[in-house]
Amino acid sequence: MSLDVVRVRGDFPILSREINGHPLVYLDSANTSQKPRQVLEAMQDHLERHNGNVSRSVHTLGTESTEAYEGARAKVAAFIGATNPDEVVFTKNSTEAINLVAWTAGQFLALGPGDEIVVSEMEHHSNLVPWQLLCERTGATLRWFGVTDEGRLDLTALADVVNERTKLVSVVHMSNILGTINDPSPIVARAREVGALVMLDCSQSVPHFSVDVAELGVDFIAFTGHKMLGPTGIGVLWGKAALLDRMPPFLAGGSTIETVTMGGTTFAPPPARFEGGTPPITAAIGLGAAVDYLKAVGMDAVHRHEQEITAYALKALADVEGVRIFGPASPEGRGGTVSFGVDGVHPHDVGQILDDLGVEVRVGHHCARPVCTRFGVPAMTRASFYLYTTTDEIDALARGLEQVRRVFA
Amino acid sequence: MIDQLYQDIILDHYKHPHGRGLRDEFAGEAHHVNPTCGDEITIRVASDLSDISYDGQGCSISQASASVLFELLKGRTADEAGVIHEKFVELMQSRGTIEPDEDVLGDGIAFAGVAKYPARVKCALLPWMAFKDAAARAGVSVNPEVSA
């Protein structure tokens, strides 16, 4: 099945708007994706016809809302190859999903001095800072894999970094700044030898290619709705049922409980144990609609399209004088997120001039400052693609970069 | 509109900064960072403002602003520096509604266009806020109170 990009674009109302007198060229999907009409309509229909609170009402609207909310959970579970929908915990975003594990791990893994947590130098701050804090709280030690000059995870010291003291490894599936797609299998194999858990930050992978938790063999994954055509305010923690069962509540309150007395509380089984308070019902339903949309297009078709766009972009960028690409230089083992520098021009100035031409890219350290440090730059410019990106848009980016060079000549 | 942002004066100061480089004679120093973009600047101020030295990294707006600050404030009295500082901050917070006075702000008038880009105002103000802290540490008061 191939992807009809013109037809796809017709589903995204925002793509027909203009920016500063130019057609919008949206190259910031790794930051947040745009939303198709089908997702917007699903949320509007819910609010107009079915709105009620979930899991506590006997009335018709409450029942319909509960069915829609739990239906979204089942769709998300199937989308990532999870056989049990109760392994899907709705959170606010990836950051909260990772924090949920990091804030409960001290207790359920009984962490203390001598234990080790492993991350990598390639992480988004959201998959780094919660583990730094966990180590500060428990006295455990944080260790990490480095990044090679080509922008790949450096696993040469795998057997040393992941060892019998390691309790949990959390690494990124696809880098939000370098575009690198990491193969977690050697890490998983080593973690199994030493009895460590493995978490994968899938914020940039689940939206862009088929992710199957059973195939990956990991224990937890985290991802977020707004990067995969859904709304903001909804994220996902997937965890193996046996592990979620052992974990204490994170944000406790209504919905998380089994029985409450003034003397104490027992807690509901997962996922309710981790979903305190009224959840983002409408956003979850929007995420369910986004999953429907992506499944209809086909994740293999999405991935193939992005591979083509990425190959085209890598060549187009390499052809602009003074442009340096960070991360893998060929489309193999990388996704549609390309960061680069323009010689003598700060990324903020690059982004500002591109915006004047309607080209929307992200600039800065991309919440991955250690990666910028690794490559010796304070910031990078990043273009990121999705199923609606066209080669014409890549051409507009390349033309824009020529304009950047003229302004700063 | 982008031409108003990237005026030749700003690009000239960016490519050929005046007074750049940290010098040893100073009474107060401040290091400021813009955490959202990573721009940073270190400013050193002599107690009589006879020298202002600085170093940093960042976009053309923040770096050119430091160069203009050096030109405008070095060798001034504290009162003069205070007036210029106030006028520059006022210009940056004006959203483009103020016609700047070249007699007071010199090359700083080129930043009037920056004021129309709310996301970039912080870039232009970074050296000025750092200067204020460094001056205070050097015992030079360039108040009135301003906020970024």
Image (cartoon, helix red, strand yellow):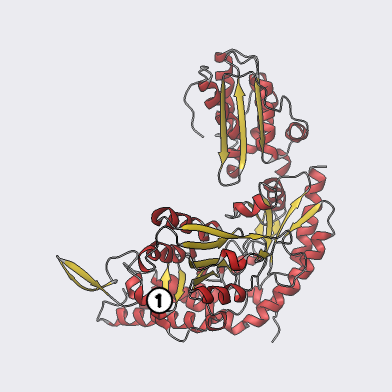
Q: Quadrant of residue A189?
A: bottom right
Point out residue A332 in the picture as x, y percentages from the top left corner: 74, 73
Is any atom of residue A382 visible in this view?
yes
Point out residue A390 in the picture as x, y percentages from the top left corner: 73, 70
Residue type pointed to by label 1: Leu
Quadrant, the N terminus of chain A: bottom right
Q: Chain of mark 1?
A: A
What residue is disc 1 on?
A243
Q: Residue furthest left?
A: A262
Quadrant, the C terminus of chain A: top right
- In the rendered structure, the answer to whether residue A72 lies left or right of residue B92 reads left
Point out residue A6 in the picture as x, y percentages from the top left corner: 70, 76
Point out residue A346 in the picture as x, y percentages from the top left corner: 71, 45
Is any atom of residue A123 visible in this view?
no
Find numbered disc 1 in the image and state the secondary structure of the residue it sits on: helix
The residue shown at (70%, 76%) is A5
